[in-house]
Amino acid sequence: MIGIRLLLLFPLVLILMLLHALPLLPRRSRLFGAEVPREVRYGSEGGRLLRGYQVRLLPLSIVALLAAWWAPVTWLWLTVASPSMAALWLLYRCHAAAVRFALPPPSTREASLSGGAGGLARRLMWFAPPLALVTAAALYLYLNWSRIPERFARHFDSQGNPNGWAFKSVRGCFGPLALGAAIILFFMALYMVMELGSRRGTERSAMLACLAAPGYLVGPMFAIVGLLPMFVPPLWVFVLLIGAYFPGLIVLVVRAVSQSAGGPSEVTPDGCWHGSFYYNPQDPALFVDGRTGFGLTANFARRLVWLLLAIILLVTAGLLLLGSKLLAQTATAPEDVASQTVVRLVDGKYDEIYQSFSADMRAALSLEALKSQIGPQVSAFGKLIETRKPAIQQIGGNTVLIVPAKFQTVWIDFTISVNGAGQVAGLFMKPGQAPDSDRHPPAYSKPDSFSERAVTVGAGDWKLPGTLTLPRSQTPVPGVVLIHGSGPEDRDETSFGNKPFRDLAEGLASQGIAVLRYEKRTKEYGAKMAQIRNLTVQEETVEDAVAAVTLLRAEPGIDPKRVFLLGHSLGGYLMPMMLDRAPEAAGGIVLGGNARPLEDVMLEQFEYAGSLPGGDTPEARKQIEELRKQALSVKDLQPGHEDGPAILGVFPHYWLDLRGYDPVAQAAKIARPLLILQGERDYQVTMKDFDIWKAALAGHANVTLKSYPALNHLFIEGKGKSVPAEYMTPGHVSGEAIGDIARWILAR
């Protein structure tokens, strides 16, 4: 706050000083713009007018300075405009008083009609330094293009925090520099017109000097703004720039006026003057010395003057419009729309996001839901650190962009669909892939004790990329295949900043157990899988798990008789089914696997979220009620309803295929070893499910069951009641759980 006030206070003091000195600047024969006798200018009457102006302006100046220090930030710029307008009013009143003492204008003015444009090229070199500065800034950006971030600060609040952003594009980076160059060239064109269209009168040199001066503020200022993609200059740079410019401008004006006062006056017929306006069809000059005030005035008899005035108005309006476009960085390209949507989400500008939605998107996601559901999720990610170049693909008539965003504790991929009109037609969030440089391996990971290589699970249309983590061993080692939970999971089963399957792979491999993990079919072929109406868990999970067992048993260095399946969540629920389909597997490990039907567990998860603080909203209650209806619809499904609409995200065939499946009853028939582990803080698959497993299998010699008081659904330690936001904090799978799994496998 103090910084911006000091930045404004410094030029305000200079402006006030200039306003106080303004009546003293014109040549000695003038008093407030009127030609008066010398005895009036320096006599009691002139002194009275000058003192009256100073006395009236002084309290206005004091009020302006106090306002600049104490007024609300949004009113600060008014403190500059107010004394300026008041000073103009005072000058007008003083001019009216001085006109009473004015000398009658001569019929002709002492003159030198010598014109000419000699030395124009040399004088235009005054515009070269500011243009060179802007050009150098543009060249610097061009040479360092690869270092410019995808998003950078363009505007800052009173605390120095960024509150306006631009994006890496030709317009976003070079736009301010182009605008600055255009403004300088505009003043340069005016300079040329006044130089060539006026005679060498008393005022021309001063006027032309004032036209060249703005470039020395515009050039450095726009060069600094243009370099914001690379670095943000400290406050003192702006203070130094403004502090050097305004005193320099005052010195330039005073010097030019004093020089012009001693020069020859310009001859202009008295009959062609109408007050302060000059109209002479016989005079070829476009501009002549003004008879009142300071500077040149136009010869309004020349059509070229009117054309020039129209051009000045149009160019000024064009520069204002161009400036609003270039500096605001309006998002029209899909990349800009996507990046701007992420920024608005982070900044909580939900109304602006909603206005950017297409009609279908507004129907699908209300403003209230955006604020109450999406907003808190994004806020929980913490501070946005950076966004990276989006991946882009065309689907139908829409452009789909995946924007990776790094927050304080997590990477998030924002999937944003933009239609042809530049509207947001789809908005999704999912955990992103953090670069390896951001990852801190768990203590139990011993990278020197294992190696990793890429493998392919399955063949044909559904082959899946995977990773085999292999211990460095001279003898065959046991192996385990990791099976995902629900949803389109990657090989690490990434959940925000957590990668439980990667932790399992490195932790088990460090203890001499090979681990195979792979992309889930719904992750690798998501769009294609979504079109399959007769999709079941066989295509989603089981087929690929069986193929992975076959692959791992055939790998060199693997003991084919000791290959196990490890299923998490949905993978644990399907473990008995997968063991039935893969009789060559040595046994199965269930991590947080539900024993109850999927629809019951899904409904319970949403009810739990609604019971948390802030979760009991009208939108949430409406959503839970709808889920209850859909869960009942699943139970009411009958054969022959396969062609019905999707229920709970999948088509009826999926649910009918699971009708009658009882994982606990099927597990009781399995003679191979089973290890069933459960986190007691798990709210997705709760201790209710573990108790069902335990009640049915506790007496079986081939079954081992264990629960962990501090672990959640990802088998990561925590404290207190588990909540969804907990997954946003990066952690690692419990070393105790990994040790139990390793000992259980190695004992068989």
Image (cartoon, helix red, strand yellow):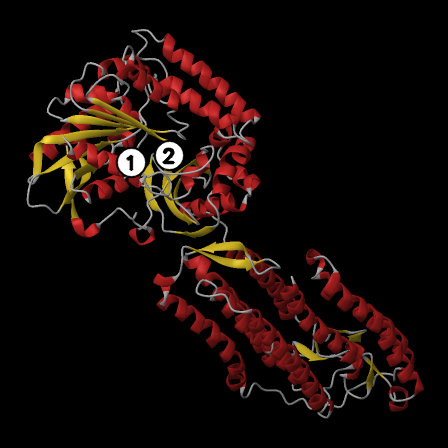
Task: Using the rendered image of the protein, determine whether residue 470 is visible from the camera's viewpoint.
Answer: yes
For mark 1, what is the residue? 737
Quadrant holding the N terminus: bottom right
How far is disc 2 from disc 1 in space, using C-alphas?
Answer: 9 Å
Residues under numbered marks 2 and 1 in contact, where contact means CB atoms less than 8 Å apart? yes
Residue type at mark 1: give it: Ala
Q: Say which residue label 2 marks.
A: 711
Q: Position of residue 229 (x, y in %)?
A: 45, 62
Residue at horizontal 50 percent and vertical 18 percent from the top: 625
Question: Where, quadrant-wise, is the C terminus in this rendering?
Answer: top left
Name the element at disc 2.
Answer: loop
Q: Is residue 704 left or right of residue 454?
A: right
Residue 573 rendering spot, x and y as whole percentages: 28, 22
Q: Residues within 10 Å of mark 1 (few under 14, many from 20)?
A: many
Q: Position of residue 627 (x, y in %)?
A: 45, 19
Instruction: Please report whichever mark, 2 or 1, sits nearer to the chain's N-terminal start.
Output: 2
Viewer can see residue 194: no
Badge 2 amino acid: Leu
Is the residue 81 above or below the residue 440 in the image? below
**132 is higher (above) or lower (below) than 503:** below
Report the front residue among 695 and 236: 695
> Residue at 55% across / 26% down in the picture?
616
Left or right for 558, reference 294 = left
Considering the numbered disc 1 on the image, is that residue within a helix, a strand or a loop? Answer: helix
